[in-house]
Image (cartoon, helix red, strand yellow):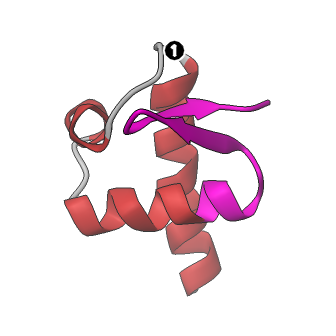
Amino acid sequence: MDSNEYFGSKAGAVWGAMNNNKPMNAVQIKKATKMKSEHVFAALGWLAREGKIGISKNKFYLTE
């Protein structure tokens, strides 16, 4: 598995967790996905770069 696949799968897990919930902070996302903090933040960066998430008051939300 290359890095794009690896981090893309992490981003997919975060997106899936957020798709079923209201806006979430990083701790809530970590708990929902059972991922390490660094993977959560890498996934959030991936999703932000793609324009799929926004942030407001330290909570992330889906834009699409």
Classify the position of the N terminus by image quarter.
Answer: bottom right
From the image, tell me which residue sits under label 1: 20
Percent x, y for residue 30?
25, 43
Place of residue 14 in the rendered image (x, y in percent of width and height, measured from the top left): 47, 42
The residue depicted at 38 percent of the width and 27 percent of the height is 24
Where 46 falls versus 4 (above or below)?
above
Asked whether the viewer can see residue 20, the reply is yes
Image coords of residue 8 (percent x, y):
60, 63
Vertical side of 43 occupied by 21: above or below: above
> Which residue lies at the image location 50% right of the left edge and 27% below the top edge?
18
Q: Residues within 10 Å of mark 1 (few under 14, many from 20)?
A: few
Locate residue 42 relative to residue 38 in the image: left or right. Answer: right
Q: Which residues are the magenta region?
A: 46-64
Give percent across and percent down for residue 38.
28, 68
Q: Is residue 39 left or right of residue 14?
A: left
Q: Is residue 25 above or below residue 47?
A: above
Q: Report the amino acid beneath label 1.
A: Asn
